[in-house]
Amino acid sequence: MENRTPGKKNSKKRLVTICAIALVALILFSMVGLRIGAQDFTMPFKFLFMDGSASVQGMIVKPYVWLKQFISFGGKCQDIRVQNQALLKENARLRQELVRYQEAYLAKERYRKMLKIKEQTDYPVVFAQVIGVDLAPWAGTILVDRGRRDGVLPDMVALSWQGVIGHTIEAYPGSSRILLLSDPRSRVAAIVQRTRVRGVLKGTSSSLCSLVYVEKGTDVEVGDKVISAGTDGIFPKGLLLGVVSSVDPGSMDGIFQTITVEPSADLNDIEEVSILLTSKMDEHQGS
Amino acid sequence: MIRFIVAIFFGYIFILLETAWGNGLQVGMARIDFLVPLVAWYGFKTPLPEGLFLVLTLGILAEPFTVLPGGIQITVLVSAYLLIRYISGHIPGLRCWHKVPVVGFVAAESQILEMLLSGAAQYIWPWGVVQGGLAALIFPFLMLLLEFWEGLFSRFTARIRVGA
């Protein structure tokens, strides 16, 4: 036992000394090599070392990266959820805004067309918004948000951007009721523009009107324009009421034709109306 | 009294909704009408003569919202109420689901009466009947809504009375 131990100690010392010398020599060689620019000497060792260690490093780092990604993903999930909610909110807001812009654009287009009507007539015009319809579904009246305070009185002509829709029958301080051409109570003195044949435009509760009291044998054709005659005391002469859509000569014993007229304005889809302040103009002209 | 307030409040709201959203609620010449189902709900619970008071008030409220000749709305609602009272008086123990066809029938009758009185008899078929069907459809939902609010108001007023 005693003989073995000093021998082992010596051999260990020798090994340590050799390693230390080799290390110092390697460091010295490297330093000298770097100083004199002779990297070629150490490079093969470096390549070998780095190549071997890189593959091991790659294997070691993978689980770490996975773990890191997993941990950061957990954190990011929360961020993504928050971001997603924020984006959804933003999307909903932008959609609303888009609808608002589209609505404003469409309203602007309608107002532009209504302004054309204003330019075409000499009467002062009041623009109004439709705020309600009649409680009875078959009655053709609408309620608008302009009334006596704005100069609106009963028996004034109401137009949409497409043409005549009817006339006011009741006027309250802040609102007024308009009787549409389609209401069975509506009667308008009318002329067929092409042949000057006279008749009365009557509502039928449907989307079409009928031109009544037109004698048989008078010249009325499909497509003829029907305009106001100006003799009923409400509608000024020359306003476009509609277009003839069908002509039925009627039975032999009758004396009148059955003429159907499609109103120029879509009476089921009215949002804004312009009211011609006809009474005001008449007063002005009278004075 | 609470039921009366609930009925008048919702009656007025329903009139405003029906006239403001009219085109959206309309199918042909029929429209989702809340007034007759409301009167029916009230009629099932409130006997004569106090029930008539609400019906007359609702009719007066509804009159300015239509161009139909004056008195038609009141007549129609009164007829609906009286018919409900008559039917419920002759069928003892009327169950909840029995009320649905009764309301449909009464709504159709009311609509037909309204059309006849206003000179629109040509729409009785099919729109008067369609109106009855629509009223029967919405009645259960309306009943739930009104019962809920009546219960809520009752609890609220009971608390006030107790002083809690």
Image: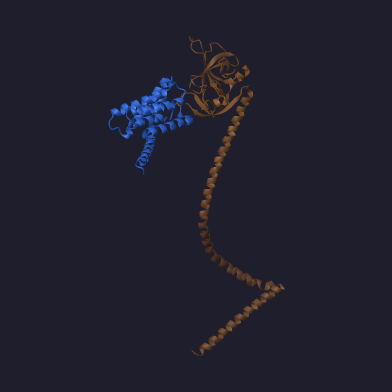
Chain colours: A brown, B blue
Residue B94 visible to an observer of this rendering: yes
Q: Quadrant of residue A146?
A: top right
Nearer to the camera, B30 or B50 = B50
Q: Residue furthest right?
A: A36
Q: Position of residue B65 (x, y in %)?
A: 46, 26
Residue B105 visible to an observer of this rendering: no
Q: Residue furthest left?
A: B92
Residue at the image position 60 percent from the left and 83 percent from the top: A17
Residue at the image position 43 percent from the left and 27 percent from the top: B61
Nearer to the camera, B3 or A202 = B3
Q: Position of residue A229 (x, y in %)?
A: 58, 16
Q: Residue furthest bottom?
A: A3
Give the vertical position of A48 relative to A208 (above or below). below
Q: Residue furthest top?
A: A253
Answer left or right for B121 relative to A235: left
Residue at the image position 56 percent from the left and 28 percent from the top: A128
Give the vertical position of B157 relative to A82 (above or below). above
Image quadrant holding the C terminus of chain A, namely: top right
Nearer to the camera, B4 or A182 = B4
Q: Quadrant of residue A155?
A: top right
Give the vertical position of B119 relative to B105 (above or below). above
Q: Position of residue A282 (x, y in %)?
A: 60, 18
Residue at the image position 61 percent from the left and 80 percent from the top: A20
Q: Position of residue A26 (x, y in %)?
A: 64, 77
